[in-house]
Amino acid sequence: MAQQLAHHTVNGCNVQVGDLMASGTISGPTTDSFGSMLELSWGGRNPITLNDGSTRTFLQDGDVLTMRAFAGEEGMRVGFGEVEGEILGVKG
């Protein structure tokens, strides 16, 4: 992650406190273990039905994403909290 941060900042990226960085998706071999929208929608070929009945193949401006995570085994569970972000349109 330190190298990823250095790569961003050296190229002029305005990294700020609270920015979320990731190194990739953690996915499994079956459809119920996919870890990204790209995998879930098979590259945009299969729409995903959301709770309100609308569908998406890719994220859209105004979409709000919430990620929650936990890890555990043998009766133990540790939560990592929650992070939320909104997809903003490009100003121009």
Image: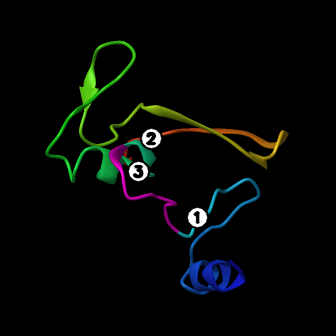
Q: How is the image coloured?
A: rainbow
Work out whether 46 lies above or below 2: above
Q: Nearer the viewer, mark 3 or mark 2?
A: 3
Cα separation, mark 3 vs mark 2, equals 25 Å
From the top left corner, tell me how far across and down residue 39 is, in percent: 31, 53
Residue 18 image offset from top left, x and y in percent? 73, 53
Residue at screen point 41% across, 31% down: 62
For label 2, the residue is 88
Farthest top residue in view: 52
Camera-side mark, 3 or 1: 3
- Give the residue at x 44% y 48%: 33
The quarter of the picture where residue 60 lies is top left
N-terminal of the pair, mark 2 or mark 1, is 1
Q: Looking at the picture, how far across and down is residue 40, in whole percent?
A: 32, 45
Query: Quick one: 54 or 39, which is closer to the camera?
Result: 39
Disc 1 target residue: 22
Kind of residue indicated by mark 2: Leu
| Residue depicted at 42% across the width and 32% down the height | 63
Find disc 3 in the rendering and name its residue: 34
Amino acid on which the number 1 mark rests in the picture? Ala
**Dot 3 lies on which element?**
loop
Q: Are marks 3 and 1 in contact (CB under 8 Å)?
A: no
The verdict on residue 30 being magenta is yes
Q: Give the extent of the magenta segment.
A: 24-31
